Every structure is written in C-alpha cells, then in structure tokens.
Image: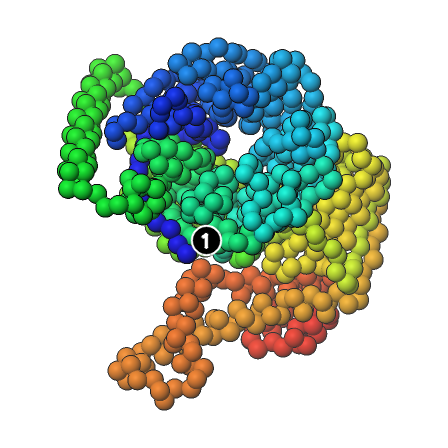
Amino acid sequence: MSLSFSRSDITQTAQAERGTMCVLPLGKGKRQNKLALGDVDGVVRVVGCKRDERNVVFKLECGNGAPITSLSCGVAAPQVDKLFASAGNTIRGINRKGKEFFKFTTNLQDVIKALHVDNYNIYAASEYVANMYVNCADSHFFMSNDRILDVVIAPVILPDEKNPILACADRFIRVVQGSDLYYEAAVNGVPTTTAMNAAGPAPGTDAKAGKIEILFGTEQGSVGQLFLDGNAVTRGWVIDAARGVGGVSALYGDMDCTGDGNCDVVVGRDDGGLEVYALDTNGQPALVYQKSLGEAVQTIRHGCVSSPFPEILVHTFSGKVLGFAPGSDSRTIDGFGLGAEKTEHEERQDNMRAEKRVKQLNKELEKLAKEVEKAKENYAAVSGGLIAVDGPAKVLDRFVLDADDACYALSLEAPAALFSVSVHSDVPIDLLDVKDNAAICSRSPADPANGTHAAATYRVNEGNNRVELRMRAIEGRAGTVRSFVVPRQSPKTSTEKVHHIKPLCLHRRDAGAAAAAPVNELVARGDFTLDDAHHWCVVCLNEIPTRTPTGVEHATYEFENVLLKTTLKIVIGDGEMTCVSDNVSPLALLKDLIGKEATENQLRVNFSFNLSDASVAHFCDRAHPLIEYQRELVRKGELVEGLKELRTQENGDVDFLDDEYKRILADEAKIVAELKEQPRRLEYLHGVVKDFTVDWHKFRGSNVKRALAGIDEALALGDVSRERLEEIVSRGAA
C-alpha cells in the first residue's frame, strides 16, 4: 500500500529549533485550527487560514532576542488554548489574544530544551537536568548521566501522577519518578527524539493494553517502539535505518493518515526525509509514503490548518511551515480523495480562489521588492565606506560515524543558500566522494609540515542550502576538522564549525557488546581517581558523557569497532582501569594515551597486560574478508573499461565472454560507483594490518617497524591467503 499527499506551503518563519510548533484546539464553531510557531529571533506567532488566505492572528516578541527553544499548549482543561514558550531559562504563558499572562524564570543554568505545563505543574528539561516545579516552586530535581536530548511526560507508574521520560545521549530511555531514576532501557542508537501515542497500543498488541506507548528515533536513523508501565519495559517493533539515511530529528505517532482507524508513524529526518509508516493488523510498520524536503525537519504535528481536513504539519530548520494532506484531492468529503466529483460550479469557484491567491502573492512580492530597494538605499546612505558583516545566524551541523562505511558523515545546513564550504584538517583524512552531492570539490595539496593534512573547497550548486561531506579517519590519529561555511548572500562572510576526531574514532557505543574470545586485557593501576579515568575515556572515545558518573564506585563502557566488528570494554574506578578487547590495537592506543595524560598531570600509573595467543588468528578472520573483497573490487574496476570497449566493438554482443566477465559488465555501474566512493580503501585496510602487527609485537617486547616496508610489498602483490596473512602478522615480517 502507498499513499499520496498534496503539499501546501503555509507560512515562513525565521530559523526554527526543534519542538517549536504546536496546533491550537478548534475554536467554537470552527473547522480549521490555528498554528503557533516559535523561532530563533524570540518571536511567537499564531497563524490561521481562511479560504486559502493566510493571516497572522498575533505576533509577540517574548524571547528578548533569545531563541524560542520549546513551545507547547497547556495540558489541563483551562490551559489547552494557552501557549507556553521557553527562551533561555525563562518560561512565558501567552493567551489566545497574544497577551503575556505568565512569566517564570527558573533556576536552571542551561537553556530549557523541553517544556510541559499541566495545571500548576511545570516540567522543564535542560542539558543535563530535568526539573519539576509546583506553583513555581522547585519540587523535584533529576541529574542525568548524559545529555538529555528529548522529553515526553506520561503517567507511567501511577495513573494520577506523570513521569518525565528522558531520551539520553548514552543510548538510554529513562523513566523518572520524583527526583529518582525509576528504571531505564537501552536502545539501539542515540535517541534524539521521542513521541507518545495517546491512542494506546495498536491492534494485535493486547498483551500491552494499559501500557504507555512511546516511540523513539535515533541519530543513526532507526525508529523503535517501547511500552512502559510501573513494572518494566516491553519492547515493540524496530524500523532499522536504510543505508545512507539521515538521523531522526522529528517524530509523531498520533495521526491516522491511512483512515484505517489506527495511528500511523510520521518520521522526519535531519537530511530532509519525510516518511509515513502504517501499522498492519499485527501492529507492524510498513512504509507507505516517502519524500525529500531538502532541509532538516524540526517538528511534526497534525491538524486542520490550510483546509478543514487533517494534514501532516512540518516545520523545517529554515522556518518553512508545510502541510501534507492525504489523498490526491484533499477537498473531498473524507479528505482521502474518495468523495463525490466536484461540480462545474465548484471547479469555477476553486479556479477563482486560486487566481485571487496568485494576484495577492504577486502584490506581496511587489511590496517586498520595494521594501528591499528602500532598505538598500538607506544602507548606502548611512554605511559610507563601511561593510556590513553578517553571515547565517546559525549553521546546523551534524558529524556522525557511519557504521556501514566506517567513515564520518559531515552535514552542514544554513537557512539561506550556500556559496561554498571549505574544509581543513590537521589530521590525516581521506575526503570521499558523495553520491548525488550538490557541490563541486576542488582539493588543495596537503602540507603536513604546516599542519595541513587535508584541505578542500566545495562549490555549492545554486539554490542549495545543505551539503554533505564524507571522510575516512585513521584510528590513532587524533585532531581537528574545521569547516568554513560561506553563504551566497552579500556581503559574503564565513561561519566556522569545529569537529574533533578522537584516537579511537571508529569505535561506537554498544550497550550489548561483549568481549569475544580471545580476550586481551590491559589494566592500569595508580593514584588516579574515577574523574581522571573518566577524562581519559572522554579524550579517547566518542559517546562518553562529559560529566563523571555520580553515586557509583565503578563505571562500565562498551564499544564496537565498526570496521572490524571487534569489541572493547572499559571498567573504571578509583585507582584502577581495566580495558578488555579481542583486538590489541585499541589497547595499545589507550596505553599510550593514559601514559601521556598521567605524565602531564604527575600521576603514578603502572600497567599490566595479558594477551591471548589466539588474537592474531582472530584478527585475520575479521580483516582478511574485507581485504579480499576490496582487492577483488579493484581488480574488477581495472577490467571494466577494457570490457566496455570490447562490448562496443562487438556491437553489444558479449555472449562469447566468460560468465565472470558478463557479471562484471552487468554490475559495471555499481563497481565504478563503489570505487569512486572508496578510492583508497584497500590501502587503508593494509594500514590497519600494519598497525595491528606493530601493536601486537610491541606488547610482546619487540619492534618490527623496520620490517613494514617488506609487509607493504607482500600485501601489495595481492592474492594473500588467510593463512599467509596470519603468517605475516605472527612473524612481523614478510
């Protein structure tokens, strides 16, 4: 089954944060909702539509220049038509007429990221803290182990008492009761957004009746379902992320798009993807609609705004507000294109309304053009020889590890069209080609002596405000990647974004990772504290909370290497740090980093280690298939051009060729594309083998660096069997 939607552009705001759009309830005798919107300029506005004409009900500057970071309607009956907005650490209440009736400055030190008002109870969450205020007095306080990325409020434990449900950056969903953690559930990625299905479990889930249904979306692109009650968490379905999709930035599960009586799941992604999943009779999701909007989706809601029929409402990063109504004709009696055909009179009325709308838009454009010209004249009169400097107010950036390709994806998005993006790295990286990229790359020569290991400028195609770059980093080489974003508007200025590559950059957090046999162990003991050991982990690995865990004697972190699928487990405490892995290379890197940090801070640290003799064979089992696949890919790539020429000479008749060559011609596009995206992957894998060889023999007390040239030659010859690879690594020589 698939759905079609008709899109309507409702209005435009300044840049928008997540969760800054909400739908006001229907007024008495009204068939269309009004829409409340907040933006980074600190403005809250309410817009409505009548006969296809958009009008601003009110516009209120209530952020004092600070961005609106959360906007919601009250929950209690007297508050459902009132708005509550947060800017900085201040909460404001706004009535339907646009008047401020409530203001409360909280004691939170960070910006409020999520807000929920239920009568006299206010739930507010900042970077690490979730607070509950009763009558504007601090009632409950909870400090999270890691950053709070989203919050929903629901009665999980007791029917008359609501609980904050926190999505945290350490891959946990946490349920809070009062000031205490009630329980937590690990999820398969970093949960960036959550949503509650108020309608309850779908058909086929009778065992989950009475539970609270929570949906979550992750930075890695997957979407999942949890059922919560006072006893435990019950896991539902999971939608795995397709290769190359963006992370989930918005989620909504309380709208019936398909008209089957069941709530569907609407997913918005930070690469502009919009998806609708319908639930079958067993409650399992199936994709029924997919569209790319070209910019990050910040908030998803539903209501009857641009027409009297239900529609999906989307607020994007640049401030666009879009409506998607189901069916090819959203004006029919049911909103799904299944009603009676329009009469000739109705068609004429529609055409007249459309013509009137076009004329109105043309007048607005003429008015705006005159305002622009007037502003230019005023600027020329007062500026003299000075140049105004003003770049994009904000650049939305995302720097994440792509587990499928073992490389980093950097996406940069501005509210206006981009002119260029320049990238500089003080650490060796490979800048990879991106399929369907909206930019032309011009690379500059590396200059390692002056700290430039990679430099390139991407000229962005006209009209694009988003660009995605991909780069491959080497474990053990830590440094900084700087991006300079230049808008197309004049005068041209630059916005800098800085991202750090850590020593163990190809390791991702994995709560289910367990060290597989064989096990290698590194233990560091000394006069360091839990804070010191935690800091070493933060310096070396991604997805570690910046704050040291409190109230515990030990902390455990588990990771997986996305390239080799090896594991790493670290247990830290006062005076002792234990690292366990089936690969010796991360242990060698940790040992070097701990030694360096301890020396700088004048701490005494002693190391002991225990290696498994089976580690070399285990490493070769993981590395050899990757090397063999890439070597075969390179070989096929070298044959493609010759086979294509042969096919041309034979007028397309290749029946005389061997089956292998026929398959190469059939997969020609895939082979060429894969080699283009990963041009030096074979060389990179050879480097991984050499690093393991050096680390293995270093732990065993010997130095084999002088034999690396011979190992290089042996690997470059190709056709290295699994047994031959193990022999090379074990001997430390070719």
- Quadrant of the rendered image containing residue 146: top right
Packing grade of label 1 (10 A; few <14, some 14-19, many >=20) is some
Residue 130 visible to the viewer: yes
Q: Secondary structure at mark 1?
A: strand
**Image spot of residue 377 (x, y percent):** 20, 18
The residue lying toward the viewer, choosing from 575 and 278, is: 278
Q: Is residue 573 left or right of residue 454?
A: right
**Image spot of residue 606 (x, y percent):** 84, 45
Residue type indicated by callout 1: Leu
The residue lying toward the viewer, choosing from 299 and 296, is: 299
Residue located 69% across and 38% down the image: 229
**Image spot of residue 18 (x, y percent):** 48, 32
Q: Is residue 574 above or below residue 624?
A: above
Q: Is residue 699 left or right of residue 342?
A: right
Q: Is residue 474 above or below residue 496?
A: below
Among all residues in the image, which is located at the extreme front? 340
The residue lying toward the viewer, choosing from 119 and 165, is: 119
Q: Is residue 119 left or right of residue 336?
A: right
- Quadrant of the rendered image containing residue 334: top left
**Image spot of residue 322 (x, y percent):** 35, 36
Q: Is residue 332 above or below residue 390?
A: below
Residue 451 visible to the viewer: no
**Residue underneath mark 1:** 287
